[in-house]
């Protein structure tokens, strides 16, 4: 069994990874770590875990690095994963980090990202970036197994990259026209008391935020640029809507191929994701919604072509807490340890 430690177990990300690991046939949670509620059973913090995981929360200072853990999940803010990366590597432990600490493999790229989010641009584990890999399995499943550190992707990045990757790779669209209009549920902000996320402030309310400055945009540009073979820029506008969980990204790009039909695009997308069990492509005559993915690790892509405006329109649906976070982390763990990519993840969306 793969023995797992979860650091940051008291947040939505921590709860999500615990939920999935509890039902995983080849993994076992052996340690839950957090800076709050130390000494409390995790099932007291999250009552739905009672009888499934009753481990006592330990402090980061008490975590032992003696080789008894195979993989560490740091479901933590930026700056924490890099703090524990050295201990992980020295003890032969794999690290899957939920923050931006290891999403960029050069000092320059990380510095640009850190400046955007207002952090120190100096990486505290710079020498370890060479052992890391970006953890979007659908694009990097060949590289992830040999990595020692995986930078789990951001939730908006997962939705938008998966939605645009086939079109960019196939040269279907003008790369100067990419627009990503993305909406997320409130859980994307994490567990934190804030007047902005107080129920009366969110009920029947929606708003855009971080316009022209969302940190996940850098991931999108980097990954799509790799597929295109050159640097590119995208417009990403993120919004919060009164929903607990889910992301819907509506993605636009002007088509450059004459006579390209919606069926043609559907077949290109189907071919690109053949072998990717967690991406479902829906043709223009179909339909897609948040309920198709809620609680699951699936991404549903509804591909459309507007012949009047020559626009490709892809609507991408994921659950921000699963495919956008803990589900991708388990997918990465499976690849790191040579397991079937879908182990512990093959379950349908919540219904109704």
Image: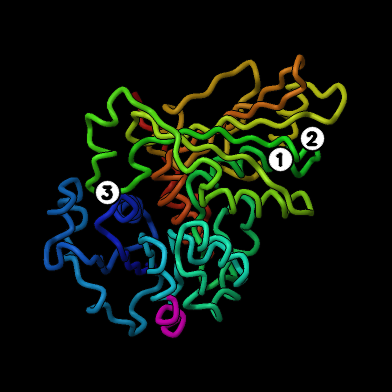
Q: Residue at x 76, y 16 (%)?
A: 307
- The residue nearer to you, when weighing 246 against 28, is 246
- Residue named by callout 3: 191
Mark 1 neighbour density, 10 Å: few (under 14) some (14–19) many (20 or more): many
The disc placed on residue 111 is none
Discs 3/1, front = 3
38 vs 201, left or right, is left
Q: Secondary structure beneath disc 3?
A: loop
Alpha carbon separation for disc pair 1 and 2: 9 Å
141 or 193: nearer the eye?
193
Question: Which is nearer the N-term, disc 2 or disc 3?
Answer: 2
Image quadrant where residue 7 sits? bottom left
Q: Which residues are magenta?
A: 85-92
Provide residue 105's location: percent of width, then percent of height: 60, 68
Packing grade of label 2 (10 A; few <14, some 14-19, many >=20) is some
Instruction: Say whether residue 210 is left or right of residue 284.
Output: left
Point out the tag, 1 or 2, that comes first from the N-terminus.
1
Drawn side of residue 28 relative to residue 40, left or right: right
Question: Is 173 situated above or below 132?
Answer: above
């Amino acid at each position: 069994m793969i023995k797992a430690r979860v650091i940051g177990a008291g947040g939505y990300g921590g709860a999500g990874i615990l939920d999935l690991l509890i039902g995983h046939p080849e993994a076992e949670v052996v340690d839950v770590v957090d800076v709050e509620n130390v000494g409390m059973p995790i099932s007291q913090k999250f009552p739905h875990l009672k009888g499934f995981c009753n481990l006592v929360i330990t402090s980061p200072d008490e975590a032992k690095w003696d080789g008894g853990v195979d993989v560490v999940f740091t479901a933590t803010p930026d700056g924490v994963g890099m703090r524990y990366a050295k201990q992980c590597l020295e003890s032969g432990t794999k690290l899957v980090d939920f923050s931006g600490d290891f999403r960029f493999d050069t000092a320059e790229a990380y510095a640009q990202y850190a400046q955007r989010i207002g952090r120190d641009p100096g990486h505290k584990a710079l020498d370890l970036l060479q052992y890391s890999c970006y953890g979007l399995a659908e694009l990097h499943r060949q590289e992830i197994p040999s990595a020692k550190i995986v930078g789990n992707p951001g939730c908006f990045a997962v939705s938008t990259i998966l939605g645009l990757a086939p079109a960019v790779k196939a040269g279907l669209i003008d790369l100067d026209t990419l627009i990503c209009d993305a909406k997320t549920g409130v859980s994307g902000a994490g567990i934190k008391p804030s007047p902005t996320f107080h129920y009366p402030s969110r009920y029947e309310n929606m708003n855009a935020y971080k316009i022209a400055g969302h940190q996940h945009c850098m991931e999108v540009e980097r990954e799509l640029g790799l597929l295109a073979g050159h640097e590119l820029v995208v417009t990403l506008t993120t919004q919060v809507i009164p929903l607990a969980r889910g992301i819907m990204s509506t993605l636009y790009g002007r088509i450059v191929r004459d006579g390209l039909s919606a069926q043609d695009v559907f077949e290109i997308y189907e071919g690109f994701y053949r072998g990717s069990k967690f991406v479902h492509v829906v043709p223009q005559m179909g339909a897609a919604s948040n309920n198709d993915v809620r609680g699951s690790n699936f991404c549903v892509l509804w591909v459309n072509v507007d012949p009047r405006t020559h626009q490709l329109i892809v609507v991408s649906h994921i659950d921000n807490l699963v495919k956008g976070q803990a589900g991708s982390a388990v997918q990465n763990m499976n690849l790191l340890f040579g397991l079937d990519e879908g182990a512990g993840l093959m379950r349908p969306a919540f219904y109704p």
